[in-house]
Amino acid sequence: MAFSAADVKALREATGAGMLDCKKALQDANGDIAEAEKILKEKGLAAMAKRTDRAAGEGRIVIKQDGNKVAMVEVVCETDFVANNPDFVAVAEKACDVTLKSGSSELNAEHKALIDEVLIKFRENISVRRAVCIDVPSNAAVGTYVHSDNKTGAIVIVEGSDADDVKTFAKDCCLHLAAFTPEYVTKADVPQSFIDEQKEIFSAQMAQDEKMASKPENVKAGILQGKINKLLAESCFVDQAFVKDDKVTVSKKLEEVGKAVGAKLSFGKISLFVLGK
């Protein structure tokens, strides 16, 4: 079956593939556009199977809310050129819609299908790296934030009140997370293995300090614990100095806001995505 220049153009618009690739696919498909599109897709997916080990250090984070659900996805690619392409942006937005619709933090076949549709065009290692969908409880405030470069996103739920001041605080907490990217929320979240490793490091450093050698063992133990406490305060969200008021910790600010609105507040779900981490 013969094909025309208009057929080649239509196939290019449908798939994003190059002109020569479209011509070859139409030849192989005897001019059948639907079959040619299938051929291009199969070739594109086969080529991408060889690229999955290539670094995907670019991409974007998207957050959307629908009623009492809020979702965040991280979609990654290889280059910032693709990350800023309108078609890639549209796929990332749709991936977040899929997560909201499913109500689950698990990736599914719909996410994969979205990515498969753009692999032919971009020819990069592209994937939905992770997703989260959070139910917002009643009488709670949700804060969301995506940084201007679309590489950091945060969701914070504050339970106990949905007053405007609480909503503002929840949003400020998101700004805090994006600014300081703490590894943990509370000390209870810190693995013992991390603490043990840091103790070994601090102990080795103290052993090399001549002034420390003459100190009694109980004093050394106190100094060591002080170093650990300081590290945990720096690493845990609730113990860090609040981004909008560095005279108080995040947990203390939570108490202050609660008193101001006449409610006992607590943190609910907290999620931070930093591209590639």
Image (cartoon, helix red, strand yellow):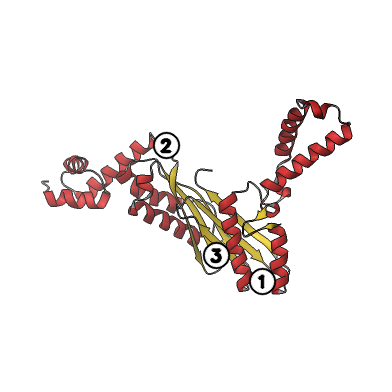
Q: Residue at x 62, y 71 (%)?
A: 165
Residue 236: image location, x then y, percent: 68, 49
Spatial CA distance of label 3 from label 1 is: 17 Å
Q: Is residue 69 above or below residue 37?
A: below
Residue 131 appears in the rendering: yes
Q: Residue at x 42, y 54 (%)?
A: 92
Q: What amino acid does circle 2 point to?
A: Thr
Q: Is residue 230 left or right of residue 155?
A: right
Q: Is residue 20 left or right of residue 96?
A: left
Residue under numbered circle 1: 161
Q: Nearer the viewer, mark 3 or mark 1?
A: 1
Residue under numbered circle 2: 52
Q: Nearer the viewer, residue 236 or 159?
A: 236
Mark 3, residues whose alpha carbon is within 10 Å: few (<14), some, or many (≥20)?
A: some
Q: Is residue 256 above or below residue 196?
A: below
Quarter that holds the C terminus: top right
Contact flag, marks 3 and 1 (Cβ < 8 Å)? no
Label disc, if present, on residue 69 of the rendered structure:
3
Q: Is residue 144 left or right of residue 246?
A: left
Q: Is residue 260 left or right of residue 41?
A: right
Mark 1, residues whose alpha carbon is within 10 Å: few (<14), some, or many (≥20)?
A: many
Q: What amino acid does circle 1 point to?
A: Ser
| Residue 26 sits in quarter | top left
